[in-house]
């Protein structure tokens, strides 16, 4: 029996401990926001946070996670009002939208470690996330906008 802490809630997991975290999240715990892309950890669609760091859930077995804290796209905010989510909506980033939860999770991790990244830093940090529709320019603009939103929130506090 493994206790998985997902978005602040504990879940008892009593299944195959070699199962990729992605499938435990989607099929057993019903967190459908994390997407399957390539199954090899190469495209970034399955990105979630493990103790605040982005990981590829399709290539991470449940046994590796243990009692660490997992955050999925659903755990960023209850109302979709995280600054990165707001920037994504404001700038209409998604086209098909399939990769966007992974893109957002990677962007959140980037802004946590670097609150005001340059274009080059964004490109490097986001290079592991593939967008079939090619919305990279909008993604970059949204990350800059989210950085500004975060600064605005801090100044108002």
Image (tube, grey):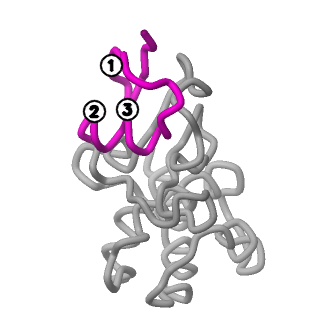
SS assignment at label 1: strand
User: Which element is circle 2 on?
Assistant: loop
- Residue 60's place in the image compared with 94, above or below, is above
Residue range highlighted in magenta? 1-30
Locate residue 151, reporting x and y percent.
54, 58
Label number found at residue 29 = 2
Q: CA distance from mark 3 to mark 1?
A: 10 Å
Magenta highlight on residue 14: yes
Q: Nearer the viewer, mark 2 or mark 3?
A: 2
Which residue does the numbered mark 1 point to in the structure image?
A: 11
Q: Residue at x 44, y 25 (%)?
A: 16
- Residue 23 counted in the magenta span: yes
* Structural distance between the alpha carbons of marks 1 and 2: 8 Å
Q: Which residue is mark 3?
A: 7
Q: Quadrant of the C terminus?
A: top left
| Earlier sequence position, callout 2 versus callout 3 | 3
User: For this rendering, which residue is in front, 8 or 43?
Assistant: 43
Q: Residue furthest top?
A: 1
Residue at (22% x, 50% y) in the render? 79
**Crowding at label 2, few (<14), some or many (≥20) Cα neighbours within 10 Å?**
some
> How far apart are the two marked residues, 2 and 3, measured between alpha carbons?
11 Å
At mark 3, the secondary structure is loop
Residue 105 position, x and y percent, is: 50, 55
Are the two marked residues, 2 and 3, in contact with CB atoms closer than 8 angstroms?
A: no
- Label located before the other in sequence (1 or 2): 1
Name the foreground residue: 45 vs 140.
Answer: 45
Q: Nearer the viewer, residue 110 or 51?
A: 51
Q: Nearer the viewer, mark 3 or mark 1?
A: 1
Q: Which quarter of the rendering shows the N terminus?
A: top left
Is the Cβ of the residue at disc 1 closer than 8 Å to that at disc 2? yes
Give the image location of residue 20, x and y in percent: 49, 40
């Amino acid at each position: 029996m493994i206790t998985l802490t997902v978005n602040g809630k504990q879940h008892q997991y009593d299944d195959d401990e070699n199962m990729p975290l992605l499938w435990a999240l989607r099929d057993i715990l019903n967190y459908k926001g994390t997407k399957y892309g390539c199954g090899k950890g190469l495209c970034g669609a399955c990105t979630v946070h493990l103790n605040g760091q982005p990981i590829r859930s399709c290539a991470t077995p449940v046994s590796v996670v243990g009692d660490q804290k997992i955050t999925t796209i659903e755990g960023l905010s209850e109302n979709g009002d995280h600054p990165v989510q707001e920037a994504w909506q404001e700038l209409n980033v998604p086209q098909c939208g399939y990769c966007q939860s992974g893109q957002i999770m990677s962007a959140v991790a980037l802004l946590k470690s670097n609150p005001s990244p340059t274009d080059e830093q964004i490109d490097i940090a986001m290079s592991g996330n593939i967008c079939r529709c090619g919305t990279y320019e909008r993604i970059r603009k949204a990350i800059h906008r989210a950085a500004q939103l975060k600064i605005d929130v801090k100044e108002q506090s």
